[in-house]
Amino acid sequence: MAEGHRERIGPFDCEFVAVNHSIPDALAVAIRTPAGMVVHTGDFKMDQLPLDSRLTDLHAFARLSEEGIDLLLSDSTNAEVPGFVPPEREISNVLRQVFAGARKRIIVASFASHVHRIQQILDAAHEYGRRVAFVGRSMVRNMGIARDLGYLKVPPGLVVDVKTLDDLPDSEVVLVCTGSQGEPMAALSRMANRDHQIRIVQGDTVILASSLIPGNENAVYRVINGLTRWGANVVHKGNAKVHVSGHASAGELLYFYNICRPKNLMPVHGEWRHLRANAELGALTGVPHDRIVIAEDGVAVDLVEGKAKISGKVQAGYVYVDGLSVGDVGEPALKDRKILGDEGIISVFVVIDASTGKITGGPHLQARGSGIEDSAFGDVIPRITEALERSAQDGVVEPHQLQQLVRRTLGKWVSDTYRRRPMILPVVVEV
């Protein structure tokens, strides 16, 4: 699809509108339906000096506004941030300063989709006489596609294979990799953990050319600490302007809503605080509060007679993949796995007489991952035996009931003695 393109898809008449974002060729979509027009912005901002000269098409949005936007779904990621997002091109001067001061290798971590940011890295490397190698499958693949499509302008001889870096002095090397969000298997995280072929050394410069996605803070700071430990100078958004966001801030959203004049607003793409802040911005521009809908995943929203409202909910959530099994693992199984991983397991094996309920073998206990030595079970075996004998006297001989009795007795002892809650697997066999 391309901006300006209009196509019938099933019952929907879809028109695609250019928006500016941190990836090339981002699009919003206007969907004309019998119930009214719905516009979804996708991820967008209003950079007035984009590197690719591709602006958010405010003229198209104004034209749609004249036709009447019945429901606007708008990006909320930066709704709490006042003002306007700085232009992407402001990053170039900061990168040049970092490149000018670096004496050894420069390692840059960025999203593999952020072609404009990688272009600025290539331009700075070319200016300072360095060669660039892409590290990580997604980075190599995306940059290859971007170059083939003409989005990435690469001077001849600038990009080299990572295997040739040993032949170059450190002062002429730039590595571009993934891992700016602290992903454990990404290249930068593995470098920080000394689990990568590229080893960080004293004097290396690492640039995290991205912002923190909410929820990733601990992982990112763990990587920063690991890199600093090996002597790297880490440059990130907290100490240098090496990133600008790809999402519209509050000032841009207000400006956008005054152009679109939506009859109903549904903030999307963000956490609850972002959605709520975006809703307030919409209300400031005149959208009635009763026509602003905040919905979670799975919530059904109807547009009827010009008004959007929540009408129900459908089943939605994570689909877990476990080996060859897709969707078969549920919350109970995940809970059991968490207990096994955190607390370990204790198995109990008891043999009882089927007619009398008396113990003829065991109890035998074995622990794995619980931190409890098998020798310690000498204290609890008499308690289990006594509980089973008492149960037999009361006429309780059904195996399932006896298993529950063993689980309660052993669980109380472990909790009282060790303050732990391992998984307890009792097995009662009748003979």
Image (spheres, rainbow, N blue to C red):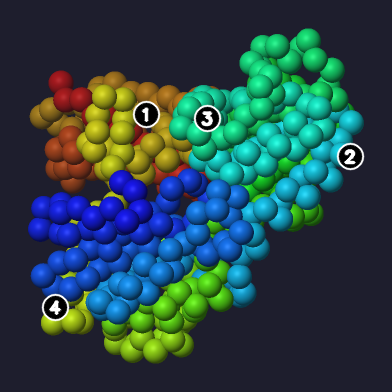
Residue 111 screen position, x and y as percent:
56, 41
Marks 1 and 2, how far apart in space? 61 Å
The residue lying at 60 percent from left, 33 percent from top is 153
Judged from the image, the secondary structure of the residue bearing numbered disc 3 is helix
Q: Which residue is mark 1?
A: 347
Q: Which residue is mark 4?
A: 304
Rendered view: 425 above or below 79: above
Quadrant of the frame with the C terminus: top left
Marks 4 and 3, how far apart in space? 46 Å
Write down the quadrant of residue 29 in the picture. Answer: bottom left
Judged from the image, the secondary structure of the residue bearing numbered disc 4 is strand
Going by the numbered disc 2, the residue's amino acid type is: Gly
Going by the numbered disc 1, the residue's amino acid type is: Ser
Whether the residues at callouts 4 and 2 have beta carbons within 8 Å, the answer is no
Marks 3 and 2, how far apart in space? 29 Å
Q: In front: mark 1 or mark 3?
A: 3
Upstream in sequence: badge 3 or badge 2 = 2
Upstream in sequence: badge 4 or badge 3 = 3
Number of residues whose C-alpha sits closer than 10 Å to that of mark 4, classed few (under 14), some (14–19) or many (20 or more): few
Q: Which residue is mark 2?
A: 101
Q: Which residue is mark 3?
A: 147
Upstream in sequence: badge 4 or badge 1 = 4
Q: In front: mark 4 or mark 1?
A: 4
Q: In front: mark 3 or mark 2?
A: 3
Upstream in sequence: badge 4 or badge 2 = 2
Going by the numbered disc 4, the residue's amino acid type is: Val
Whether the residues at callouts 1 and 2 have beta carbons within 8 Å, the answer is no
Residue 191 visible (yes or no): no
Q: What is the total number of numbered labels drawn onto the structure image?
A: 4
Judged from the image, the secondary structure of the residue bearing numbered disc 2 is helix
